[in-house]
Image (cartoon, helix red, strand yellow):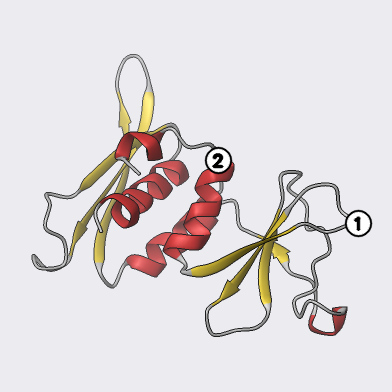
Amino acid sequence: MTKEDICNLSEDEINLLIQEHIFDMVVIELRLDWYPVPVKCFYYKDSPYVQYSWDKKACNAMIFRNGIDDSDGIAKSIPFYSNEIEAAWMIIEKLRDQFCFNVRTIHDKTENKFVCEIWGLHSNQYRGQGIKVYSETASEAICKAALILKLVNE
């Protein structure tokens, strides 16, 4: 995937890739007889429980965390990283021990944009000059920069 590919992703695509590649979750897709669209379920590698679920209708589909009954609760929907700053900030919290982040606004006469820059804390952790992404929202800039870091530069 290229930087351009990532910058052209939809919000749903961004949210799914963040869950899988930034938070290192295993993703499986279920096609349930009783539900009209496929449901993606997200697991931590060391846990048998569904932590999150997602579908095109953006509802939960009532996936049980243990896959059998509601004794362990219902898997909640994945966070909306690309359009909620609280969720996007979880990305920064996850990566801040390895990388520096700078998120700021840029104002000029024609538009207001946000920029997110990421660079390594130590010179051997990131070989480039850093990543810089401009976007309409801070949360989207954070997401796209993190995905470029993980999917393009690894």
Residue at image mark 2: 11
Q: CA distance from mark 2 to mark 1?
A: 27 Å
Instruction: Establish if 12 lies above or below 135.
Output: below
Q: Is residue 31 left or right of residue 99?
A: right
Q: Is residue 28 left or right of residue 88?
A: right
In the picture, which quadrant includes the N terminus? top left
Q: Which mark is residue 34?
A: 1
Amino acid type for the residue under numbered disc 1: Trp
Q: Position of residue 92 (x, y in %)?
A: 38, 61
- Let me know if residue 105 appears in the view: no
Q: Residues within 10 Å of mark 2 (few under 14, many from 20)?
A: some
Question: Which is nearer the eye, 78 or 69?
Answer: 69
Amino acid type for the residue under numbered disc 2: Glu
Which residue appears at 40% of the width and 69% of the height? 94
Instruction: Establish if 98 lies above or below 71.
Output: above
Q: Position of residue 21 (x, y in %)?
A: 43, 61
Residue 29, image quadrant: bottom right
Q: Residues within 10 Å of mark 1 (few under 14, many from 20)?
A: few
Instruction: Establish if 68 lies above or below 140.
Output: below
